[in-house]
Structure formats: C-alpha cells, structure tokens
Amino acid sequence: MNARILVVDDEPDIRLLLKDILEDEGYQVDVAEHARAANKIRSVAKPDLVLLDIWMPEVDGVTLLKEWKTNRNDSCPVVMMSGHGTVETAVEATRYGAFDFVEKPLSMAKLLSTVKSALSSVDSGQDSEPLEEPVGNSQQVQELRKQMQLLRNSNQPVFIVGADGSGRKIWANYLIRLSNPDTSLKVFDPAMDLMQFMPLSSNLYFEEISGLNELQQTQFLQLIHQQNTASDLRVIACSHFSWLQLSEMAGVLPRIAELWKTAIEVPTLRDHIEDIPELLEYYVNWFGENEQLSYRHFGVAAQNLLRNHDWAGDLTQLKKFVRTTLNNSQEHVVELDEINHLLQNADFSSSLDPENTLQLSIDLNLDLREAREIFEREYLSRHLQLCEHNITALAKRVGQERTHLYRKLKSLGLYTKKHS
C-alpha cells in the first residue's frame, strides 16, 4: 500500500495543490485545516508522514508538533512548512522532533525530495524498531557499561568500533538513554543533507563513518566543531574498521580519526560467550514481547552447545537463530536434536560451504584502497547472485543498512535499476 500523507495547512489553495501533486505521485493524502482536524485524522488514519504548516489559527504548528512528540512512541516523521519569516522557527522545530522543513513558496522538487527522504527514514527502521538492551555480565560487557557511564554527563562526540553484527547501535542507543532519555537517536541517511543538522538539532548516528563522501566528511567535521557546548545532544559515529585503519584511509578521514585518540570497542560474541545463556533468555522474551512469539526454554545442555558454536555473524546471527527456533516448534523445551538440525542451516553453520565460499587472489602490489575495492566488488557481486539481486535481502545478508549499501553498490558499478 502506498504511503499515507497528512497535509495540515489553513490555506485551502495550498491544501488542494499539495493533495493533487502528492496524489499524482501515488501517495494517499488527507488534509486538515487546523490542529483539531489534524488530531482527529491522526487518531483514525495513522499517517506515515505529516506536512505541517507553522502559522495556523488557534494552535500553531510548532505547538502541535511538541504535543505529538511528547509521546515517545510517536515515530511518524513531520516536515514543517514555513514562510520566509518563519524559517528560523522551522529550523528550531527540528529540535522538537521535526524531520525537516520546506520553505514557502513551495518548490515542488524540494518538497518531493524531502517527502521521499522522510518516508525512507521510516522504511529503514529509524526510530521505529523496538530498542534492544545490552545484555551480559562478562568482564567485557561490564567494562563497556562503565565506559558509557563515564560519558553520560558529557555531549562529546563518541566513536564506536566493532564487527558488523556485534551491536554497535544497541550500545549507541544505550548511551543516549543514559545521557538524555527524553531524546532519541536519528540515523544519518546518506541521502540527507548533513547541513540541515547544523547546528546539531538531534542526536545523530553514523552507522559507517567510512561510507561518507568527501563533502559529507568535511560537513561532519564542521558539525562537530560548531556544536554548542551547552547542548544535551551528541554525535555517535561507528565503523567496523579500527581507529588505526580509519586513520590510514585516503581523503579527510585521517582528520576525522584525529577527533578520537581512542575508540570504544564493542566485543565480538566469541569474546564473551559466557553471556550466551543470558542473551538467549533475553531474546526469547524480547521476541515474545515484540513479535508475540511463544516462550521456549533453552536448558543447560542447549546453552552449552550454543556457547561452543562459532557465531560468525555475531550477535545478529544469534538473535536470528533464536527467532528461527521460536518459530520452529510449539514445544516448551528446546531439545538438542532440534538445535543440531537448525544449525545445519547455511545461515547458522560454522563450516565452509563451497557454494557459500569466496576464493580470491589479490595482487599484493596494490595499495590497501585498491585491494579493498576488489574484495568488496567480488564479495557483494557474489551475494547479489545469492540474493537474486534483491537489495533488501542483500542488506540483511551482509549486515548493512540499505541506504549505505545502495551507495556502495553504485560506487563499485554493481547497481542498476533491475536490482531494486
């Protein structure tokens, strides 16, 4: 079903114009002339996006936005519409949860681009998926919690490194909740204009800092340097590369790496396998609460078997295994035979399947950037074939966000419209 958009504006001509344009683009459109009508529609229609005018009778747009965003479960993106005299107010509205703003008189190209970006932010799971807690009592996990506690009262930018699937975003959200539980984490989409966040208007999360192009890297540095020292918002940048690897990369990445003399490192699951029993119990309950899956019990023998398994896909793979197990049977106890059978699945097996193995020869005379590009092209090309060119499936398979993956595929010459 196409996205549903609510247009809130007291000017009938603008409401009619936007309704016609958006419907021509394939969207479902509702219109409201004031706050009361908007609230009534939102209670029954559940829009995927709201275009909200600032100046309206009785209740203005910013006040209405604040009212909506006091509900922490409200994940519907809001784009403010402002006249020339209210641009500063519109910018300020991003502090209260607005996704972006468009200026009147409206540029249809700008409007449609912003609408697409706002809807994409929801499609990518931003602020919509239930949050996970960091789990475990191992020395590594306890040390990581202490590091986060030491940072809770500052707004300094934070750099987190760790293998894909190890839970970097889980720890980023944990830090935000420690620092300011009334705010949330906005995931930076490479399709966004980074300038819209200057000065910093929300907690901003970069899934893979090495994926920024040169302009975005420069803007990133500018964003950091312009941050208000009194702000309770922060930037969290992540990478599966180490600090040393980033500092050796071309472009301005060394300047970015210099922002952090050290990085907060999220351990791989193999480094704290003693936490697996607790992780199993946590995700059994998590899926019960969020996906209404029936509770099943992993006994001591089952826990020990899974502790000795090689979780090459890290925490993400363990979580996927728990979901598969809960869906596999209604039996209360998870038996060893069932676990062994499920582990034979290619997604969970630690053995090398020839069909799932990439053999590659790389000329050692190449520099690191060229060698990495060859590997990434062959790696992603093979996975594209295995996923039958379904990019959504590819993103899940390789543990990358879809927007970052699109950019990577394009840069490697692997993306065409038939892949979408």
Image (cartoon, rainbow, N blue to C red):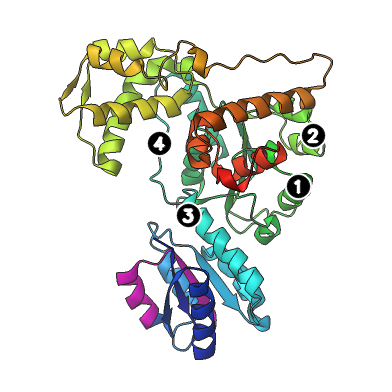
Query: Upstream in the sequence, badge 4 or badge 2?
Result: 4
- At label 4, which amino acid type do we have? Glu
Q: Nearer the viewer, mark 2 or mark 3?
A: 3
Q: Secondary structure at mark 1?
A: helix
Residue 122's disc number: 3
Query: Upstream in the sequence, badge 1 or badge 2?
Result: 1
Establish if 290 lies above or below 24.
above
Tell me what residue is drawn at x 60 percent, y 50 percent.
189
- At label 3, which amino acid type do we have? Val
Query: Upstream in the sequence, badge 4 or badge 3?
Result: 3
Q: Which residue is mark 2?
A: 254
Task: Kindly tell me whether residue 153 is visible in this rendering.
Answer: no
- Magenta residue check for 271: no
Q: Secondary structure at mark 3?
A: helix
Q: Which residue is mark 1?
A: 221
Q: Are marks 2 and 3 in contact (CB under 8 Å)?
A: no
Q: Nearer the viewer, mark 4 or mark 3?
A: 3
Per the rendered image, the range of residues in magenta is 37-55
Residue 349's disc number: none
Establish if 175 lies above or below 9.
above
Measure the alpha-carbon separation of dots 4 and 3. Answer: 21 Å
Q: Secondary structure at mark 2?
A: helix
Query: Upstream in the sequence, badge 2 or badge 3?
Result: 3
Tell me what residue is drawn at x 57 percent, y 45 percent.
418
